[in-house]
Image (cartoon, rainbow, N blue to C red):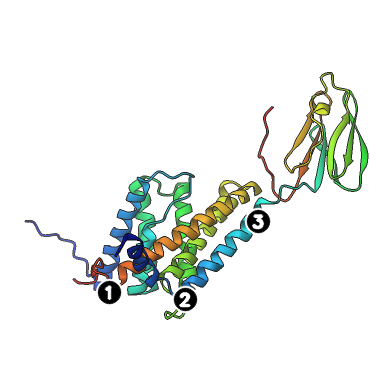
Amino acid sequence: MPTSTIKLNTTAEDHHIARMAAVALGLTVLENAIPSPLPGVKPGLANIATLIVLARYGWRAAAWVSLLRVVAGSLLFGSFLAPGFFLSLSGAVLSLLVLAFAQHLPARWFGPVSHSIYAAFAHIAGQMLVVYLWLIPHAGIAYLIPVFAIAALVFGTVNGLIAARFMDKNNRLSPQIHAD
Amino acid sequence: MNSYESVHAAILPHIKLGDWLTILLGGIFVALLALKLWSGDIADKAVIRSGGKIFREVPLSPDQQIEVPGPIGVSVISIQNRKARITSDPSPRQYCVRQGWLQQAGEIALCLPNQVSVELTGSTKKYDSLNY
């Protein structure tokens, strides 16, 4: 077997990030196969990966995973630099900003479910900003905001629950990701 | 353990007290958004156009009558009880007069031959456009 001439020095953290970004990408592809009743309403399954990374490896790694997922996902679907890409990006960036604050909530009372809900609301806020400022500068889109907000609350709660359940050490379903 | 209990065991231990608070706040936030953004249909202003240009913008109270000159004559617009209508118009088919009272934001009456229109506006529009 020929050996590669390019040798990258990677750290254990790089490996965690790459692995979780790959998981997030897989969830993105899976999610795109699910038909949506309304364009723009998506469960955001990839955010489960972001939440787990946030809890295990901190905000910096979560930001890497989230942004890698947005860029690589857009390359997979051929939407890089298209409007859909900027919608994903603005949602992801605003979610990460909110998570930077939400992660400091006392862990005794606030878990991944809270993080997930705040991030989901930030996500639609970022998207609606781009839609309003760039794509559809019409006040009529305000009419859709409650629909997206309800979706954010429901899917945010569900994704947070999945992430929390996944990380539960007492749960026999919980695989230990960081065993390498 | 039946399935109902197992669902509870799967969900409840993962929602902490603060998470319940977050869900509650989120629910209130969504309800307020829906109330604020979905009840803005009541019109508060009538925009009167003549020849494509805004002739006047009038509030829906007090009651009044406005005469708008157009290429083939004068259209009369009435404002009454927070509603508006075109009372008389020189156009041959009288579509805009027969449309009657306009009440909700986004409703519009057009008198094409005389190039006069009345559109009600509110905080949000109910329709982007209407087809007849």
Q: Give the residue type that dot 2 points to.
A: Leu
Q: Secondary structure at mark 3?
A: helix
Specify the label residue B35 is tagged with.
3
Determine whether, in the image, residue B71 is placed left or right of residue B126: right
Picture quarter with the C terminus of chain B: top right
Asked if badge 2 and badge 3 are on a common chain, one would say: yes
Q: Residue at x 47, y 72 (%)?
A: B19
* Most foreground residue, A42 or A96: A42
Q: Give the residue type that dot 1 points to.
A: Lys
Callout 3: residue from which chain?
Answer: B
Count every numbered label the image shows and give the total: 3
* Most foreground residue, B89 or B62: B62
Of the two numbered discs 2 and 1 in the rendering, the one whose residue sits closer to the viewer: 2
Callout 3 touching callout 1 (CB < 8 Å): no
Q: Secondary structure at mark 2?
A: helix
Residue A24 spot, x, y in % from top left: 33, 58
Determine whether, in the image, residue A41 is placed left or right of residue B10: right
Callout 1: residue from which chain?
Answer: A
